[in-house]
Amino acid sequence: MKGQSAYLTTQRLLGGLLCVVGLGMVVTTLVRGGGPFALGVVVGLSFALLGAGRVWLARPVGADPE
């Protein structure tokens, strides 16, 4: 069980990092004058959504979260 807990923790950390990087891409693209369909916004939103999905899928399911 300890290995599985470490795996889930790593998945949450990497998902959160991916989400932060994606949001950073969106912010920097918009600050530099990009529009809503600029490449940085589209790719950044994709990263953010994939990261959030990864965190959501790595959540503990059931009565015993460990």
Image: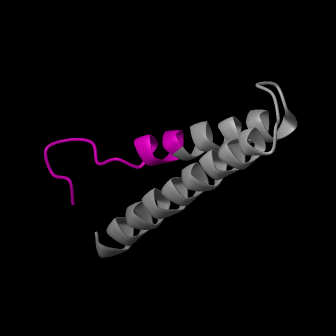
Residue closer to the observer: 61 or 32 = 32
Verify whether residue 61 appears in magenta: yes
Residue 40 picture location, percent across and down? 80, 41
Verify whether residue 62 appears in magenta: yes
Classify 46 as above or below 12. above
**How does the figure colour the protein chain or chains?**
one colour
Looking at the rendering, the stretch of residues picked out in magenta corresponds to 52-66
- Which residue is rendered at x = 82% and y = 37% of the image? 33
Q: Quadrant of residue 57?
A: top left
Residue 38 picture location, percent across and down? 85, 32
Residue closer to the observer: 41 or 35 = 35
In the image, 53: left or right of 36? left
Q: Point out the residue furthest to the left here.
A: 63
Residue closer to the observer: 41 or 52 = 41
Residue 58 picture location, percent across and down? 41, 49
Classify 16 as above or below 47. below
Residue closer to the observer: 45 or 58 = 45
In the image, 2: left or right of 33? left
Q: Quadrant of the N terminus?
A: bottom left
- Chief SS of the magenta region: loop
